[in-house]
Amino acid sequence: MGESYSAFLYLIASICFIMALKGLSSPDTARHGNYFGIAGMVIAVLTTLATPQVVSFWLIIAGLVIGGAVGTFIARQIQMTALPQLVAAFHSLVGLAAVCVACAAFAAPEDYGIGVRGNIEGASLVEMALGLTIGAITFTGSVVAFAKLQGLVSGAPLVFKGQHLLNALLGAGLILLIVLFVMTEATPVFVLLVLLSLAFGFLLILPIGGADMPVVISMLNSYSGWAAAGIGFTLSNSLLIITGALVGSSGAILSYVMCKGMNRSIFNVILGGFGTEGGAAAAGPGVGDRMVKSGSAEDAAFILKNAGSVIIVPGYGMAVAQAQHSLKAMADLLKKDGVKVSYAIHPVAGRMPGHMNVLLAEANVPYDDVKELDEINREFSSTDVAFVIGANDVTNPAAKTDPSSAIYGMPILDVENAKTVLFVKRSMASGYAGVENELFFRDNTMMLFGDAKKMCDDIIKALE
Amino acid sequence: MADPASLAQTAGELAGNAHDLAQRLDALARQLTAVHTQAAHAGTPFVFELTVFALAVFVGYYVVWRVTPALHSPLMSVTNAVSSVIIVGALIAAGPPGISFAKIMGFIAVTLAAVNIFGGFIVTQRMLQMFQRKK
């Protein structure tokens, strides 16, 4: 196939990818968008297979079959609560693939038309080094993120003395190595660059705590895009450049949205260490010296049944307890009794952007009932019951009133304005920010201690 | 005072100069157009790629801001699948005859990217299926 033909087909594939993202502007068009994405990918792969350089197919077919089977199997088996770690794992694969392609381009530049071994064009070398570095950082960074989300290592931030200094030195070392590589094109420098980038990605994510994962995942999403763009520059392939830029900016926007949802700067997140003291430190006091009103499932059922309107505020605790189906069943019973039920989602609820929405959708909650913070926050004051299940910090009024609080300035859901607040929690432990929630001690608050799923089931029993 | 003869001579010289200048200007203009068309056609490849990149970043920016927050998870998984288009580079590495280091690298990258492509699109589809309007 001629070069302008393939360039044209690559353009069509790029447009398909843009349409795939555009489809996501509404749930009604989203599935069409996904088909566009698949079509774009098929066009891209077939076009590449038809280029004259590709003559031997057995390894390619083997790779596609093995990879395709593994990917299909995982995607079909995965539970929706495990979505964040799945996405992190997938990001790591993109990163590693970028590293492999950079290695191949370095070893056999003539295949890509960017010069011959030992005499690769200068611009291509810069781009190759960038694609390689970002790819390697994405790879190890995502592996750490995956391990934290999967619970293989503690979600707590791992900080040690001199960490920032070490990272700064590594970063400077990377830049130096890139310059050196572009000047010498030496294999040892290339290998060193790979190793250092891998170490850097590892150390970069290590200090970031589990609750900051929405930002981290978005950031790694962005990196995987920039890595693809870097490889695209190396190979002078517009499709890769366009797609990389799309994915890169998408991830960057999501990171921004998540940071804003926590009122933190991206630098603050990257530097890490947030919530170091963890729940334990602040969990001690509270129960002993201050009174909380705790109730049973029957009490909750009584209050809910007699309410005119209920807003449910789900958080990560609901995901951990897999309580979404029971919650939906409970909401259905209430609706049957004529109670108006809606759901309020905080931007950083869960462990990845939009995580709660997916879990509720999985439980067949109609998405028109699910509201974002800006849409619903004013309605709390005219609501009878706020039912907070597995969320804590995102409801803490200290974010508005206490300038010394770690979460001061974070936008919160104003559940305190509801006539009654029901908190489903396992214990009095504070949230990840390590901040006491004074809402627990208010007169109109009732604590429902227990596992989120079990509590919902018990409330259902009491309602029936 | 200058005599008419020398005046005429100066005038003649000036006219000659002007003609010369006009000719050189013409040549310059022609050169300029040549350079211009060249720049418009190609520039350096890097500048062209950078143009594509910058425009794509803007497209991404505007398209992604319009994505409804409820669909941020599918957005992430679909961008993940789409970024595996890096497979294009991997296919070229795995394509040549014989066995080489580059080819092995290409094979690994094809496999990894394939996991991502199939996994990413399928999991996105699963999620979007849940967001269907309930009848």
Image: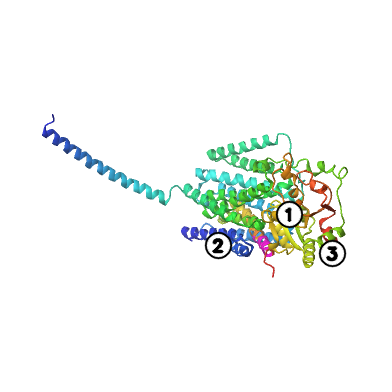
Q: Amino acid at mark 1?
A: Ser
Q: Nearer the viewer, mark 3 or mark 1?
A: 1
Label 3 to label 2: alpha-carbon separation = 55 Å
Is residue A51 at all visible to an observer of this figure? no
Task: Identify the disc placed on residue A23.
Answer: none
Kindly report the secondary structure that dominates the magenta region of the rendered protein.
helix
* Magenta region, residue range: B121-129
Q: Are marks 3 and 1 in contact (CB under 8 Å)?
A: no
Q: Nearer the viewer, mark 1 or mark 2?
A: 1
For residue A343, side relative to residue A299 (left or right): left
Circle 2 sits in a helix, a strand or a loop, which is it? helix
Front residue (pair A176, B25): B25
Which chain's residue wears label 1?
A
Q: Amino acid at mark 2?
A: Ile
Q: Amino acid at mark 3?
A: Leu
Q: Are marks 3 and 2 in contact (CB under 8 Å)?
A: no
Which chain's residue wears label 2?
A
- Does the stretch in magenta take in A383? no
Counting the numbered discs, the total is: 3
Label 1 to label 2: alpha-carbon separation = 53 Å
The residue that disc 1 covers is A381
Earlier residue among tags 1 and 2: 2
- Quadrant of image for the N terminus of chain B: top left
Q: Position of residue A364 (x, y in %)?
A: 73, 64
The residue that disc 3 covers is A463
Task: Identify the disc placed on residue A43.
Answer: 2
- Quadrant of image for the C terminus of chain B: bottom right
Q: Position of residue A141 (x, y in %)?
A: 68, 46
Q: Position of residue A53 (x, y in %)?
A: 52, 56
For residue A332, side relative to residue A167 (left or right): right
The residue at 57%/44% (across/down) is A130
